Amino acid sequence: MEEISHFVDGQRVNGVAGRFADVYNPATGDVIARVPLASAEELDGAVKGAKKAQPSWAATNPQRRARVMMTFVSLLNRDMDRLAEALSKEHGKTLPDARGDIQRGLEVAEFCIGAPHFLKGEFTDSAGPGIDMYSMRQPVGVVAGITPFNFPAMIPMWKFCPAIAAGNAFILKPSERDPSVTVMLAELLQEAGLPNGILQVVHGDKVAVDAILDHDDIGAVGFVGSTPIAEYIYARASTNGKRVQCFGGAKNHMIVMPDADMEQASDALVGSGYGAAGERCMAVSVAVPVGDATADALREKLVPKIESLKVGPYTADADIDYGPLITGEAKERVLGLVQSGIDAGAELVVDGRDFSLQGYENGFFVGPHLFDRVTSDMDVYKTEIFGPVLSTVRAESYDAALELAMDNEFGNGAAIFTRDGDTARDFASRINIGMVGVNVPIPVPLAFHTFGGWKKSAFGDLNQHGPDSFRFYTRTKTVTSRWPSGIKEGAAFSIPVME
Ligand code: NAD
């Protein structure tokens, strides 16, 4: 059986801790590889290599570092199909969706070609008599990223591209469920000219994660994953004095106003609710039609579209709409939540529980589900399902719909479908959620803006990618300098002020 390796100091290295996790092809249910789970000692070895390599990388001028990113982008384009195939095989998402996963990471690498601009700092000429004042953005040093299974290429690239372009060395602990593509990305960066030790990929579970959180030589930690783990990592790493940003789970609402185009709204709900089998932190999982007439009209449009969704293995390429869930455990969890919705009295309008695919009976496929008349006290509403299940909560009014989304503990994304500019503007202004769509169901900002939720969807101060990423991965140092002509005689004992 294939054994996936770590990537440390410029080469693939086997794990020596003796612990492994199975990696599946979710479409067949077969174990296709095993991934080593690093010990604290192995993690420490990677940090030592990174610490040694980082100073000369930081001293490399920013344009040269940016050129590595430029070459990396062209190599990603060259190898797009090979990367997408490896990603789909372990994750299960369709090939076009896997290419999108890589592309959205590639766009952050493209953005990082502009690193010299973001690292410029500020300068005040003659801040006092003969005094100049300037601030520099310096890399933190060795930093780390811990990433989830659902975007195995995009999210690692969101983390390591800005960190590396800013002059840091990066320890990546990818998801142990679909780890292969990250090693391929590290090899491409090396081919692009990145010195050895600047991107270290160390696979693992809680043991490796805890070793990152407690390591004295790691200055910053970026995490993306579920909310309970985000809270844990935020608390432990910040107690250890690190800079931390943790992005967690979501429950994204899409409000459908009576004046919305129902054809467009239903298409948007089907794509955003069931794409990638609902395993997206920006998936719409709650439809909120305003008024019973809207709810009925929307349901009438939705049902045939959901019933005709094509579910299958990634090898069917563009002929399928979504693939299997990541593990058998994830499948059981989703089906359990569906049962809880039925037990709580929600109306199961489309039932995907009996879905089975000839030749893929052991795959982790779940058919599409649609619930109507869900209420906010039900588990199926409160829990992030992370599967192909869309819940409809009927709202009496726009205000009730707004309040529902605002009262939800998560705050990643929200959307409104309407033809009315005033309503859309009011929604965008009042909603307490980080990313908002107006007639756009999955409002994932592009690389030059920042990505991040509010409430229990994010912990820490700065967002991912965009200008915030350079702020997160750099420290500001401010220098006040005076040359002899500006120095007056005698010591000063009170704080200098400008008169
Ligand atoms: P997860 O929390 O199970 O795992 C994320 C990472 O944490 C993995 O690398 C994993 O190895 C590690 N981990 C897991 N358990 C741990 C523990 N007990 N201690 C220390 N580390 C641990 O998340 P997942 O299932 O891989 O990903 C899905 C989740 O990620 C969903 O909740 C989804 O909403 C969220 N997500 C959020 C965003 C965002 O930007 N807000 C983006 C993508 C995914």
Image: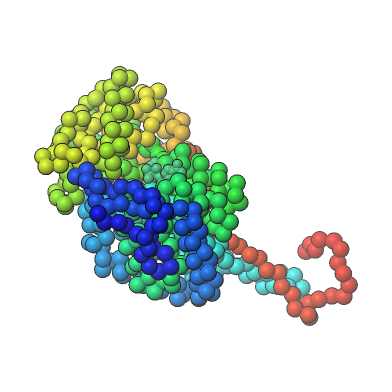
Along the viewing direction, whichever of 477 and 42 lies nearer the viewer: 42
Question: According to the image, what is the colour scheme of the structure?
Answer: rainbow
Q: Is residue 388 left or right of residue 118?
A: left
Locate residue 181: give its quadrant: bottom left
The image shows residue 206 at horizontal and vertical percentages of 45, 46
Locate residue 323: give its quadrant: top left
- Specify whether residue 424 is in view: no
Image vertical order of residue 169 relative to residue 426, above or below: below
Q: Is residue 447 left or right of residue 469?
A: left
Residue at 36% in and 44% down: 282
Q: Quadrant of ligand 1?
A: top left
Along the viewing direction, whichever of 226 and 128 lies nearer the viewer: 226
The image shows residue 119 at horizontal and vertical percentages of 53, 67
The image shows residue 304 at horizontal and vertical percentages of 16, 33
Q: Is residue 235 left or right of residue 370?
A: right
Residue at 22% in and 50% down: 94
Residue at 36% in and 64% down: 12
Residue lying at the far bottom of the rendered structure: 485
Image quadrant in which the N terminus is located: bottom left
The image shows residue 423 at horizontal and vertical percentages of 39, 37
